Image: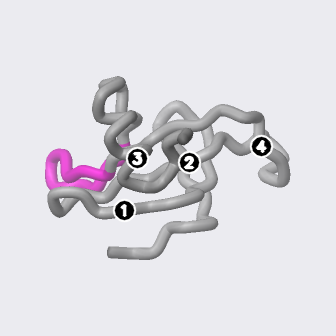
Amino acid sequence: MINRINQLMTLADGKKYAVVKQAIYKNENYYAVVRVNEDEQSINEEYAILHELMYNDQMCIEKVEDPEMIKFISKYLGLDEK
């Protein structure tokens, strides 16, 4: 697993995210990220969970949309509110 914490990821839609935390769950990488503004120096308070996967023999990143999976991964990464 490549350590991507504190690195920027650019999704297909052009939005950039800074990786805050990452973890492996069932041999797949998940990332807790925060959206970075155009200047790449500030954030805009948009948070997401990303999932890394192979698609057509190419490594891809997708946003996790399932609310239960978001909740689970957030807890797994220690991000859940107590």
* Residue 45 in the image, given as x and y percentages of width and height: 72, 35
Q: Nearer the viewer, mark 1 or mark 3?
A: 3
Quarter occupied by residue 73: top left
Instruction: Determine whether label 2 and label 3 are within 8 Å by CB.
Output: no
Determine whether 65 is above or below 26 in the image.
above
Quarter of the N terminus within the rendering: bottom left
Q: Are marks 1 and 4 in contact (CB under 8 Å)?
A: no
Main SS, magenta residues: strand
- Earlier residue among tags 2 and 4: 2
| Badge 4 density bin: few <14, some 14–19, many ≥20, Cα 10 Å | some
For residue 52, side relative to residue 26 (left or right) = right
Q: Mark 1 or mark 4, which has the lower sequence index?
A: 1
Counting residues from the start of the chain, the first of labels 1 and 3 encountered is: 1
Q: Which mark is residue 23?
A: 1
Please report the bounds of the magenta region as a residue range. 52-61
Asked if the residue under mark 3 is in contact with the one under mark 1, i.e. CB atoms within 8 Å, the reply is no
Q: Can you say whether 79 is above or below 68 in the image?
A: below
Instruction: Give the CA distance from mark 2 to mark 4.
Output: 10 Å
Q: Residue at x 51, y 37 (%)?
A: 48
- Cα distance between the residues tagged 1 and 3: 11 Å
**9 falls in the magenta region:** no
> Can you identify the residue that label 4 sits on?
43
The residue at which mark 3 appears reads as 75
Q: What residue would you read off at disc 2? A: 33
Amino acid beneath label 4: Ile
Q: Amino acid at mark 2?
A: Val
**SS for dot 1:** strand
Q: Quadrant of residue 26?
A: bottom left
